[in-house]
Amino acid sequence: MDSSHTSERLRASVTALMRATGQTQSDIALALGVDQTQVSRRQTGRAAWTLDDCDRLAAHFGIGVLDLLAGPERARARLPRTRPRGRGQGVPA
């Protein structure tokens, strides 16, 4: 599998998780320790997500890295029942 397909799938997973949890790019940036512009660049494909980003994203959403990389359906299905929602506050699913 080529890296562009993996990158597209990762971007789709992040978008799906953000929608499912009501989080914004600013929320993701806060979790990653970067600014919102850097998240935007990663989500539009102008910059690549790093392996550290993947680890942090998975931990932030409470899912495994492989679930994150497997695509949006699997990533959403693996969200814990209580999960971060906007500004990292946990609420029941």
Image (spheres, grey):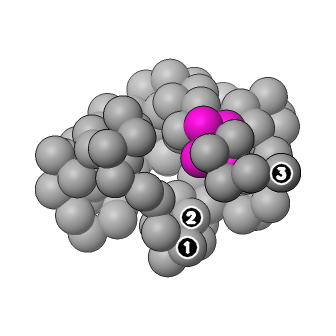
Going 75% across and 38% down the picture, which residue do you hit? 71
Binning the other alpha carbons within 10 Å of mark 2 as few (below 14), some (14 to 19) or many (20 upward) gives some
Q: Secondary structure at mark 2?
A: helix
Instruction: Give the farthest residue toward the front.
Output: 2
Residue 15 horizontal/vertical position (percent):
51, 30
For marks 2 and 3, give the CA distance: 18 Å
Residue type, label 2: Cys
Magenta-colored segment: predominant secondary structure: helix
Going 26% across and 58% down the picture, which residue do you hit? 30
- Between 47 and 69, the residue placed more toward the observer is 47
Task: Decide if residue 51 is on the left or right side of residue 86.
Answer: right
Disc 2 + disc 1, Cβ < 8 Å: yes
Residue 28 horizontal/vertical position (percent):
35, 49
Q: Residue at label 1?
A: 51
Residue 6 horizontal/vertical position (percent):
69, 48
Residue type, label 3: Met
Quadrant of the rendering where the C terminus is positioned: top right
Binning the other alpha carbons within 10 Å of mark 3 as few (below 14), some (14 to 19) or many (20 upward) gives few
Disc 2 + disc 3, Cβ < 8 Å: no
Residue type, label 1: Leu
The segment highlighted magenta reads: 6-10
Q: Residue at label 3?
A: 1
Q: Earlier in the sequence, mark 2 or mark 3?
A: 3
Which image quarter: residue 78?
top right
Task: Decide if residue 5 is on the left or right side of residue 91.
Answer: right
Q: Nearer the viewer, mark 2 or mark 3?
A: 3
Q: Residue at label 2?
A: 54
